[in-house]
Image (cartoon, rainbow, N blue to C red):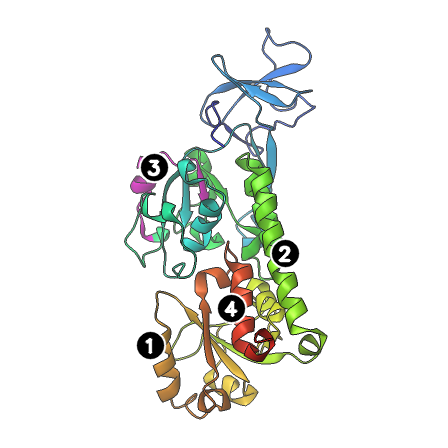
């Protein structure tokens, strides 16, 4: 839903605007007791009606309801948490990777995007026509962290969504973003302890920030319905004795694998459990010896860019894995890496995994 009012993003670190209170900025002499004039990070002035929770400029009005989110800097150890208040929807979004971009495509927000990257993990299952219409900032396979600050600023970006590492001092720090009118958004689903509830939370946040709350709620309900259908099909006995899964993301000297977090939760909902579920992280790099010792029932390859066949061949010839029971029995499956990190296709990915783990359950 495109708003007529220009985007204004107020950062509590600089000034606070909360509906129903006039903190932070002083009211203008022309403002009544029920309104206050605030200045956004880009220098634009807005009159906020506290009671109606509306924002207006001199030339247009909007029914946009100011919405505050928390930027979780403490999660990444790069500062104290801070709040951000939106008084209109961002109009120049940059999403780092298909995982992030698919949230916007799924919510029909391509007109709010200045660009995106496909990153290393492509969305190999979901088909969004908008993917071919929105500007790609880097070549396929190249993450946004490889772009220059000049490239980012040239897009007019006012909202950037990516993994925490994107906002480190080595790339586009929080200070850099805020000084240039860019709100950095760290998705809830990227936390080491995240579950599907955090994917739902990201939809809720984006729905409110961009004024598409109803559509976001519909998308969440569709996910929930898909998961409920999978659970009903698999039955209680499957979840009581889940299949043991080794997730092969990448790595030859040592495997990079999924443990807990969103990928761990997805595997559990598909009737499995990661053989490294005891590691208190979303992702980790154990040794091949540990993989052999834990002897998985199945192997799940995370497909980056249609590279499942290549990874399968590696597992069949690697000295550590070629004699694994799962390899000898041909129980090597795959799932879209982008969806396995928490994205628009995550619920569908659970169904895809469940069908591979328990094909007989879906033949009825």
Circle 2 sits on which residue? 224
The structure residue drawn at horizontal position 54% and vertical position 42%, both measured from the top left corner, is 206
Q: Is mark 3 on a helix, strand or loop?
A: helix
Q: Distance between the residues labelled 2 and 1?
A: 33 Å
Circle 1 sits on which residue? 310
Q: Where 198 falls versus 266 (above or below)?
A: above
The x, y position of residue 305, in whole percent, is: 35, 65
Q: Where 38 falls versus 259 (above or below)?
A: above
Q: Which of 148 and 128 is in front in this view?
A: 128
Q: What element carries label 2?
A: helix
Residue 217 visible (yes or no): yes
Circle 4 sits on which residue? 352
Q: How far apart are marks 2 and 4 (CA)?
A: 15 Å
Is there CB contact under 8 Å for labels 1 and 3? no
Q: Distance between the residues labelled 4 and 1?
A: 20 Å
Is there CB contact under 8 Å for labels 4 and 1? no
Asked if the stretch drawn in magenta spans residue 150, the answer is: yes
């Amino acid at each position: 839903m495109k708003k007529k009012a220009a985007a204004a993003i107020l950062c509590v670190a600089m000034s606070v605007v909360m509906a129903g209170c006039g903190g932070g900025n002083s009211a203008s002499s022309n403002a009544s007791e029920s309104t206050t004039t605030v200045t956004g990070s880009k220098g634009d002035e807005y009159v906020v009606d506290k009671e109606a929770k509306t924002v207006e400029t001199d030339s247009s009005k909007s029914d946009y309801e100011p919405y505050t989110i928390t930027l979780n800097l403490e999660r990444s150890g790069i500062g104290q948490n801070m709040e951000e208040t939106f008084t209109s929807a961002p109009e120049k979004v940059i999403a780092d990777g298909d995982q992030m971009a698919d949230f916007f495509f799924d919510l029909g927000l391509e007109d709010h995007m200045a660009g995106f990257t496909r990153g290393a993990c492509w969305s190999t299952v979901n088909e969004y026509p908008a993917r071919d219409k929105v500007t790609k900032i880097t070549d396929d396979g190249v993450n946004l962290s490889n772009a220059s600050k000049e490239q980012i600023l040239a897009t007019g970006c006012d909202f950037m969504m990516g993994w925490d590492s994107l906002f480190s001092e080595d790339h586009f720090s929080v200070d850099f973003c805020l000084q240039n009118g860019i709100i950095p958004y760290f998705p809830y689903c990227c936390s080491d302890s995240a579950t599907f509830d955090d994917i739902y939370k990201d939809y809720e946040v984006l729905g409110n920030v961009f004024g598409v709350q109803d559509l976001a709620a519909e998308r969440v309900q569709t996910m929930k319905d898909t998961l409920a259908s999978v659970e009903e099909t698999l039955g209680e006995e499957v979840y009581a004795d889940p299949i043991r899964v080794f997730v092969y993301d990448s790595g030859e000297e040592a495997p990079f694998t999924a443990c807990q977090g969103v990928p761990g939760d997805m595997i559990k909902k598909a009737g499995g459990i990661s053989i490294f579920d005891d590691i208190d992280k979303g992702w980790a790099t154990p040794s091949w010896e540990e993989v052999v010792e834990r002897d998985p029932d199945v192997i799940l390859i995370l497909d980056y860019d249609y590279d499942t066949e290549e990874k399968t061949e590696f597992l069949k010839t690697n000295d550590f894995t070629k004699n694994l029971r799962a390899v000898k029995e041909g129980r090597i499956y795959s799932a879209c890496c982008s969806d396995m990190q928490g994205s628009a296709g995550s619920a569908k990915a659970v169904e895809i995994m469940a069908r591979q783990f328990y094909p007989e359950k879906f033949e009825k």
